[in-house]
Image (tube, grey):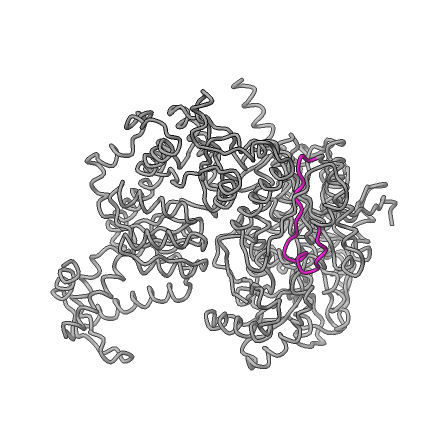
Amino acid sequence: MSSTTLLKESGPREVFCGLTSIVWLHRRMPDAFFLVVGSRTCAHLIQSAAGVMIFAEPRFGTAILGERDLAGLADAHDELDRVVNDLLARRPEIRTLFLVGSCPSEVIKLDLARVAERLTGKLNGRVRVLNYSGSGIETTFTQGEDGALNCLVPSMPVSQEAQLLLVGTMANAVEDRLKNLFGRLGIDKVSSLPPRQSTDLPSVGPGTRVLLTQPYLTETAKALRDRGAEILQAPFPLGTEGSRLWMEAAAKAFGINDIHVANTLAPLMVRAQKALIPFKERLTGKKIFLLPESQLEIPLARFLHRECGMELIEVGVPYLNREVMEPELELLPHNTRIVEGQHVDKQLDRVREQSPDLVVCGMGLANPLEAEGIATKWSIEMIFSPIHGIDQAADLAELFSRPLHRRELLNNKLLVSA
Amino acid sequence: MELTLWTYEGPPHIGAMRIATSMEGVHYLLHAPQGDTYADLLFTMIERRGSRPPVTFTTFQARDLGGDTAELVKRNLREVVDRFQPKALLVGESCTAELIQDQPGALASGMGFNVPVVSVELPAYSKKENWGASETFYQLVRGMLNKSPSEESDQERSPTAWKSQGRRPRVNLLGPTLLGFRCRDDIIELEKLLDIHGIDVNVVAPLKASPADLMRLPKADLNVCLYPEIAESTCLWLERNYGMAFSKTVPIGVGATKDFLEELHQLLEMPAAEPGQGAQHLRLPWYSQSVDSNYLTGKRVFIFGDGTHALAAARIADQELGFKVVGLGTYSREMARPVRAAAKELGLEALISDDYLAVEAAMSEAAPELVLGTQMERHSAKRLGIPCAVISTPMHVQDVPARYSPQMGWEGANVIFDSWVHPLMMGLEEHLIGMFRHDFEFVDGHQSHLGHLGGQQRQSEEHQAQTEHSSTQPHEVPSSEESPLWTPEGEAELAKIPFFVRGKVRRNTETYARQAGCRHIDSETVYDAKVHFRA
């Protein structure tokens, strides 16, 4: 492992909780519904996080706990049964219902696992009811997806077949492209978790090799390993280098001839690196500060430094899983400052001191930093944009160069008009 | 337990955040878990605010729960006072912290800070955002005034004190907040309006007020309650404790602005104002009277929003634009009574609900030609293919315009004319385009919030029309025993009716046919029904 500087910080945080991941999960599986069991705050959080980005009919909702539920006047189990029945009557197309635990439901120790089991039995297999926690006291932002996928694992059918399993939500178009490329390498059986239909779960077993597409799937990876799958160690498929190493890890595990792999990927690499040039020119030498939010910070930092020439001031992560991040950490430059956890005020003090050219941060912090003259990029955009794979490297770089480009445009115009 | 897919109001601590963020020199210590910071983006994104809300979240985690969360609160309190040096410290908790009962307010009061500490307890499992804002504002005003009792509190106050003191009368403008609807511009408009009438503004609060400003509130002759959802409880308290009268008319619309000025002149015992004084730029009445506006006559309008804006909209629509109000409602339960009364006067039953699906169903049923609502009604109206203007929070970033666009006062009336009539003209254009394309159903691509119900209904209607067109004989519908049958001729007549009232006409005609004992509906039945329901 390289000698990165690992620091821990605690204090007030400016990070979403795991419930937020429902915003992309519900779009991935259109036959699933996510029912948060929580408070009005939970309902307001999801609609606020989602409302800025989507206008679709929601396949998520909140069973809002009221005073009667807390005082024990109403049996929470009966109440939840009633809410679920109403919901399924209105949405008969739903095949999987996720009961999502929240801070209040965890604090009052509502046993959602028991509720889910009972409801699944009662619904007689028509709807599978699962549960996981997206509470802020236990999870951050993208960890919610880890919880959701982890609770799907026990339902996956058994298979001895040799296959590649891609784990983590990606844009559909990018997923198709990657499957096509694996096919060219000679890996024909490639499936995905989460699937595009919640009932269409991939199989798993001793022949299964897993590539994580996202760096926040610790528990899911463990559960898959327990089902006999092998978790392949690789950097994450962001940028040309990470994507190549990621695909090569699969090729190696499937015993594919090195020369064939090199011949297949080389033309893609040449093309992608050419496409990167204009963005690299703009980003080289620029200082970037990544605030903790999505867990993508370390792979992004690796890409921005190694392929775009950016200088890493600080890389914040909500939490650090060394095992999952090992291949990424090895690629980071000597003495990269990695800070796990957050004290948002102190961290913003450091941002101001260092005056970076670009800050990657959450939606609550972006405009205040912009108003101080610091260019920003929303970290949540990385979750919603098709950025995975060799072919997407230039698009990924473009996301970071756009705020800088925009500043140049606006400043020039202001000078002209002044 | 209540199933909620979308909510008009956030939890009550969001209301408290609105008060803290609106003011200057106030910091809010919120005992809350990780994730509750989402609320910051309401301010920094919807309002495009260039600074962080002055709110510190204690961010407790599961592992803290076994230990000492009270110590965590204290550590954060010390840091907040040290770092931000607020002029007043608000202390409260969000829904989860309420369950663990650390009582951060009591903790803060015991720490000997040299800062006024105001503790706000907002029951998260029974109350909502506007209530939380109202309660917080009231607690702050009370806390600040009680902490430094001035000699003024003992004085017998009168709205006419200005006369004996030989100065212009002065008032407080109470209620404007961030994330309120156009509060920023309403204040500017009202300050201008009052100045023309010789009235000074003493304090505007909570927006841009400091804790010291709150202590100056009793120096005014009168309180103006601009947004009762936020300011009424404070006005009542100031009336009880400081003998300060307050005005109750909300000056949105021409008539209401006139009434507002009259109320102020009366309360302050000022000589009545010249009619139209300062109103030379008011254009709504003339625009409404001009011949071009004839087509607005009797336009069916559906209104839903917070209590204040829904009431104002109903009055303007009915009395100033000549629309026909076909639906009126609010999500503000606190305002249910006046909204019910206003609806009754319009011959309607008010819709008091915080279920947007119920609102969309009522909207669909009322078959309006214009919807005035919140951002959610805009979505619903879009799905139903009906033009819409936003008149109330909750709102989106596009409802916080860069330009000056108040709702209150004379200029507010002008802004309202433009913003309600423009979507309507566009609606008309869209309709014309549809007619020329021989495609009345251009909205079919949108799916209703009612979902499958809305979509299927329309689909089945279309399907029915197609199959019945293809055969020359009316055929039996197996499911209904007494439903009259539409002949192809009747269907063809129905198809000529604009899509947004077609469903209503279909139902009315069927009702009429049943009453009249017609088994088949042809074009004559459609005309008969039309006359029947008009009579």
Q: Which of the 4 quarters of the picture holds residue A215?
A: bottom right
Side of B408 relative to A387 (left or right): left
In this picture, is A216 found above or below B113? below
Q: Which of the 4 quarters of the picture holds residue B518?
A: bottom left
In this picture, is A76 found above or below B314? below
Side of B474 relative to A125 (left or right): left
Residue B275 lies in magenta, yes or no?
Answer: no
Q: Which of the 4 quarters of the picture holds residue A374?
A: top right
Q: Position of residue A31 (x, y in %)?
A: 53, 67
| Total labels drawn | 0
**Figure quadrant of the C terminus of chain A:** top right
Q: Is residue B466 something one can see in this rendering?
A: yes
Q: Is residue A400 something one can see in this rendering?
A: no
**Residue segment shown in magenta:** B86-104
Which residue occupies 85% across, 41% down? A334
The residue nearer to you, when weighing A23 against A334, is A23
Side of B207 relative to B266 (left or right): right
In this picture, is B89 found above or below B457? above
Q: Position of residue A104 (x, y in %)?
A: 65, 62
Q: Position of residue A192 (x, y in %)?
A: 64, 64
Q: Position of residue B255 (x, y in %)?
A: 30, 38
Residue B100 lies in magenta, yes or no?
Answer: yes
The residue nearer to you, when weighing B365 against A307, is B365
The residue nearer to you, when weighing B235 against B55, is B235
